[in-house]
Image: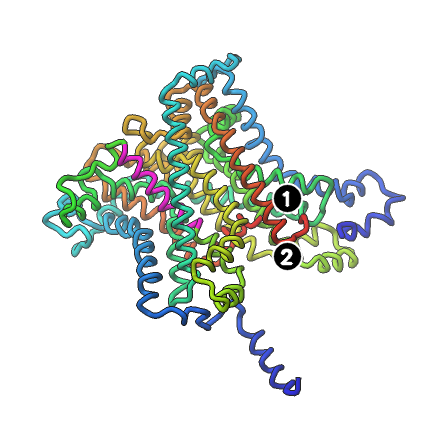
Amino acid sequence: MADVAIPRAKPQMSEANAWTQLKHNRNWLGFWFMVPAMAFLIFFLAYPLGLGIWLSFTDARIGRVGQFVGTENYEWLWDDSIFWLSVFNTLLYTFVASALKFAIGLYLALLLNEHMPFKAMLRAMVLIPFIVPTVLSALAFWWIFDSQFSIISWSLKQLGLINQNINFLGDTTWARISVIFANIWRGVPFVAITLLAGLQTVSPSLYEAATLDGATRWQNFRYITYPLLTPIIAVVMTFSVLFTFTDFQLIWAMTRGGPVNATHLMATLSYQRAIIAGQLGEGAAISSAMIPFLLAAIMVSWFGLQRRKWQQGESND
Amino acid sequence: MTDLPASKIDLKAVISTPARVDNSEGMSYLQSVPRRLVTLYLPLTIIVVVLLFPFYWMALTSVKPDEQLLDLDKFNPFWTWNPTFKHFQKLLFESYYPYWLWNTMYVAICATILSIVASVFAAYAIVRLRYKGANLVGGLIFLAYLVPPSILFIPLATVVYQYGLFDSPLALILTYPTILIPFSTWLLMGYFKTIPFELEECALIDGASRWQILTKIVVPLAIPGLISAFIFCFTLCWNEFIYALTFLQSTSNKTVPVAIVNEFVDGDIYRWGSLMAGALAGSLPLVILYAFFVEHYVSAMTGAVKV
């Protein structure tokens, strides 16, 4: 199939000089076409990725090139309780937020898949939290969760459920709940809309056949929807886990890691150590410590994709 | 088979109506109305209200007079009868807000155009030139998509400093494509695969060069995909925070998200009005863009996860 693409190159082969080679040879042409994208990705992605790992083995500071210090940064972090707290926070944040995003997102996708009036408009409205810049909606949450003028506290007081304001972002437990809630709020539309796209590819005749055979709604979901949706769930959740794990902006806009580091994630801690305190090496060590977790998530994605191909009998294209 | 004309007419009707329009009720007649109310409309309403409430709150706060903002007992906090545009006025005429908007838009448009051009070439080469190792490069680009900015910003900060780009919009214009290129290449690869190969074959036989094929056949046919990629990249740029926070320093150079977080958050208890006005004004351009291109937006989002 691919050989059809170069019918011109063959007859000219005999008189091919270097220039026509460069112009018509598939591999050279491919190379020229890849140059712009590759230049960006090598200079600003691959090189910094390597540089970051190198920096984590040096004592670099802002304005000073570091000396190689071996694993000193990592040893230092190993004994740093704040670092371990941030690892715990990151894992808690990722697991709780991702699990709830998945549950609510799937539920919302199933609801939106029903026939109802104003379906298109509803779908469009659901996606709005995803397109509004995270920092700006985080500021709205900051105001909603204000210690004195929180609308939630006010409403609960009016209903007589509580007597005094909840200190949403000042209390460690409430702060964690608040940022996780904001993260779920932002992530649900993405999960819901992508799963909805997957749901729409499931043929309705499967449900009709199953219903005729006496299947309940739960059985319809469990034995038709869920198995057919598994591949796309794997991909969506990998993305969701990945971006939750490396989240920075939501936390930075709402709590900056406080109170008493209760909401510090690894990303915010590395920013604080590297840019604010100037310890580039230590910050780089913290962000490099995220890589194993990310690799694990990517492996999950990889196996999810394998399964998709196997299920749909697609060729490797 | 006997009523051939009738079936022909039916076929025509089926073809001429768009496939998406489906007015049949499906299996929903199996459920009674009260049951649908409880299992469908009630939860849907709750979720949609929760999803949209922060925007309502943002908009309401930005037009409330200051005294109403802080006195929840004398005034009903959920509505205001005398809206004011004082906060917006302050934003536009007494702060750098217009500069920040301009910076954000400038950076987003430049970075998006750069990325789309690079991605069109890369995606075409991977899908259609199929050079040696194209599959491997495609896989690597997908992996690049999964590298988050949070682990790159520290080394990138030193790189940006070395190249003398610190505190310049160029730093963002050159680093944002690392987020955008993997995504849009992946999206465009999907689009290019749907363009019939035969069109290119014909053009090749007629003596078109690869460049002519790309600009005269492939790109015009992939316009919907390009629009999707464009608006999604634009949104990602507008949303980007950590690079802009790290690489920019002077107040007038900042982008909207960074500037609002850093410059508006002071000790003033009356800051909420202008803060929310700033957040609203920073979100509106994207929401308006989104309103015009909902379908493209959704296809970009689902195309990105379709592997």
Residue lying at 50% horizontally and 28% vertically, measured from the top left:
B156
* Disc number lying in front (1 or 2): 2
Q: Position of residue B95 (x, y in %)?
A: 29, 39
The foreground one among A260 and A98 is A98
Q: Amino acid at mark 1?
A: Ala
Q: Is A177 a magenta residue?
A: yes
Residue A25 visible: yes
The foreground one among B134 and A193 is A193
Residue lying at 22% horizontally and 32% vertically, measured from the top left:
B267
Element type at marker 1?
Answer: helix
Q: Quick one: which residue is furthest to the right in this view?
A: A14
Magenta-colored segment: predominant secondary structure: helix
Counting residues from the N terminus, which is met first, the one under dot 1 or under dot 2?
Answer: 1
Tag 2 subunit? B
Q: Amino acid at mark 2?
A: Thr
Tag 1 subunit? B
The foreground one among B206 and B180 is B180
Q: Which residues are magenta?
A: A173-191
The foreground one among A115 and B27 is B27
Residue lying at 46% horizontally and 57% vertically, measured from the top left:
A221
Q: Which residue is mark 2?
A: B194
User: Which class describes the residues within 10 Å of circle 2: few (<14), some (14-19), or many (20+)?
Assistant: few
Question: Which circle marks residue A92 in the picture?
Answer: none
Q: Position of residue A168 (x, y in %)?
A: 24, 37
Relative horizontal placement of residue A269, taking residue B187 as reference (left or right): left
Q: CA distance from mark 1 to mark 2?
A: 16 Å
Q: How many marks?
A: 2
Q: Which residue is mark 1?
A: B122
Quadrant in the rendering for residue B201? bottom right
Q: Is B90 a magenta residue?
A: no
Give the color scheme: rainbow, by chain, secondary structure or one colour. rainbow
